[in-house]
Amino acid sequence: MRYLIPVLILAGLVVLFAAGLKNDPREVPSPLIGKPAPAFNLKLLGEEGSYSNADLKGRPVLVNFFASWCEGCQVEHPVLLKLAKESNVEIIGMDYKDAPEDATQWLARHGSPYRKVILDNEGTAGLDWGVYGVPETFVLNADGVIVYKQIGPMTEAAWREKIAPLMAGAAK
Amino acid sequence: MRTLLLLLALLPSLAGATMAADVAGMDASQEARYRTLIHELRCLVCQNQNIADSDAPLATDLRNQVRRQILAGENNQQIKDYLTQRYGDFVLYNPPFKLITLLLWLGPAVLVLLALVMAYLFTRRTRKPSTATALDEEKLRKLLDENK
């Protein structure tokens, strides 16, 4: 009985710390989940005209913040290419704090999974979307509302378990 | 060695120069607010640094944003709101008191209280045997007296 209380407290702390270990401090929950995509109106890469947040409405899309200087983007690139090709997912690229020439070259070398590439050279859209490190991928439903944010490289597991069901639900 | 010393001596002035550029066009109270704010805001890339100390490009962007908004006449709360709308409460080193941060704010007080309660219980428990031995001594003396 004498040692019961300390042992119970220790057990409680162990449970608390074990749960804490599973949390990744790099993954800061986005306050934008459930909110409409932040407004922007930016030029496109390799074509005339501009693209705004209004253009994201009408169907579920992935908005992928990437850059030619970003290593994690190379890691996730094959996954994005596969999604665009095999699952016919509409991915909009957001070229974050990058030189357009570098992005063009990078996409020529690695292939482009993007329907459109928006130029966010100054990172202003990135700031409004709460991007703090590329790659980050936002899942938008047909109303243009952000339903999920993938922080760090897109993986097949993340697509299968989290994003694909959301996209399927969002298509309705 | 001498060049190294010279470089070291130059470092603070370099830092001073960048700071001066940061606060250009601000009056004294705006400058003070700027300095306080950038020390209270977290850099999200290098998570245990504030944006004043961090060299990360994101920290520079956030500092620029804070400066622009101060110069545009926004107050501290408006600037903090702007950033939490985008990055969440995590961007604040001083998190607000609300349901989700309850454990964070009250946890330490609860633990101290628990420690005090336990300390009290333990000291009370150890006091008992000492009164028991005092009784025993009395009994012993009585027994010895009887035997005389």
Image (cartoon, grey):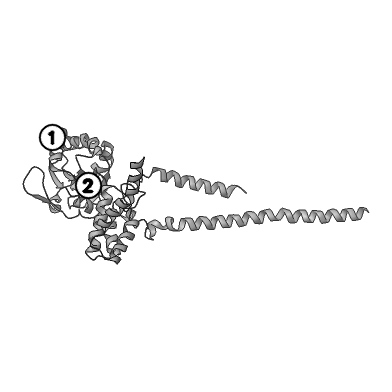
- Residue A76 x, y percent position in the rendering: 23, 37
The one of A100 and A131 positioned closer to us in this rendering:
A100
User: Residue B97 occupies which quadrant of the picture?
Assistant: bottom left
Residue at the image point whose x is 29% and y is 57% from the top? B84
Residue at the outermost right position = B148
Please tell me whether mark 1 sits on a helix, a strand or a loop.
Answer: helix
- Residue A65 x, y percent position in the rendering: 21, 45
- Relative to B84, is A168 above or below? above
Please indicate, yes or no, whether residue B32 appears anywhere in the rendered image: yes
Residue at the image point whose x is 36% and y is 55% from the top? B93
Tell me the tag on residue A139: 2
Residue at the outermost front position = B2
Q: Is residue A46 left or right of residue A135?
A: left
Protein chain holding label 2: A
The residue under label 2 is which amino acid type?
Val
Q: Which residue is mark 1?
A: A108
Mark whose residue sits in front, 2 or 1: 1
Q: CA distance from mark 2 to mark 1?
A: 25 Å
Q: Is residue A1 left or right of residue A118?
A: right
Please tell me whether mark 2 sits on a helix, a strand or a loop.
Answer: strand
Q: Residues within 10 Å of mark 2 (few under 14, many from 20)?
A: many
The one of A16 and A167 positioned closer to us in this rendering:
A16
**Comes first in the chain, label 2 or label 1:** 1
- Residue A69 x, y percent position in the rendering: 21, 39
Protein chain holding label 1: A
Please indicate, yes or no, whether residue A31 appears anywhere in the rendered image: no
